[in-house]
Image (cartoon, rainbow, N blue to C red):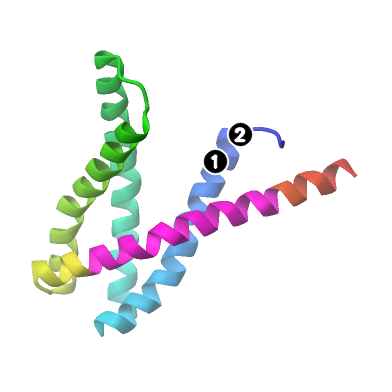
Amino acid sequence: MTAPKSLTERIFQAIGFELLAILICTPLLAWIMKKPLLDMGAVTVLIAMLALAWNVVFNRFFDRILARMNVAHTVWVRVVHALLFEGGLIVMGVPLIAWWLSVSLWQAFLLDIGVLLFFLPYTYVYHWGYDVVRERLMMARTV
């Protein structure tokens, strides 16, 4: 087992996660949507910033509600958490995407769902890869 991650490392990991996602998503989505790379890059960065801000706000309120109601983090509570978090992000992100890219709300919704489907495996692979590389670096330091 390796040492726990510091706040600085967690920030580094989160920034790396977002930057790599932007580098992957921007050209891919520009090609799929037939939109200029700069426009898609801007909307991708905006959605990433929105997701980070929403994460902080949503989790703060969600945790407070759980504490007030004395509810444990069960599997079902985590499912509700994920659905509410993603639902809120869709409600805020779809109009922004539609406006920025001059597309319909339906097209923006489909794009957002596509991005969500990308992020499910990406999140798993990124964090697994990060932990593998981190473990190897930690082992190399002890040798």
Kindly identify the residue that appears in the image at 31 percent across and 28 percent down.
Answer: 60
Q: Which residue is mark 2?
A: 6
> Residue 44: horizontal and vertical position, in percent?
32, 64
Disc 2: CA contacts within 10 A as few (<14), some (14-19) or many (>=20) = few
Q: Relative to residue 112, is residue 86 depicted above or below?
A: above
Quadrant location of the C terminus in the rendered image: top right
Q: Which residues are magenta?
A: 111-134
Between residues 124 and 43, which one lies in front from this camera angle? Answer: 124
Q: Amino acid at mark 2?
A: Ser
| Secondary structure mainly formed by the magenta segment | helix
**Callout 1: 10 Å neighbours few (<14), some, many (20+)?**
few
Checking the image for residue 10, the label placed there is 1
Residue 82, disc: none
Q: Label 2 near label 1: C-beta < 8 Å? A: yes
In the rendered view of the protein, which quadrant contains the N terminus?
A: top right
Q: Is residue 35 visible?
A: no
Q: Secondary structure at mark 1?
A: helix
Q: Quadrant of residue 110?
A: bottom left
Left or right: 100 in relation to 14: left
In the image, taking residue 65 as reference, residue 143 lies left or right, namely: right
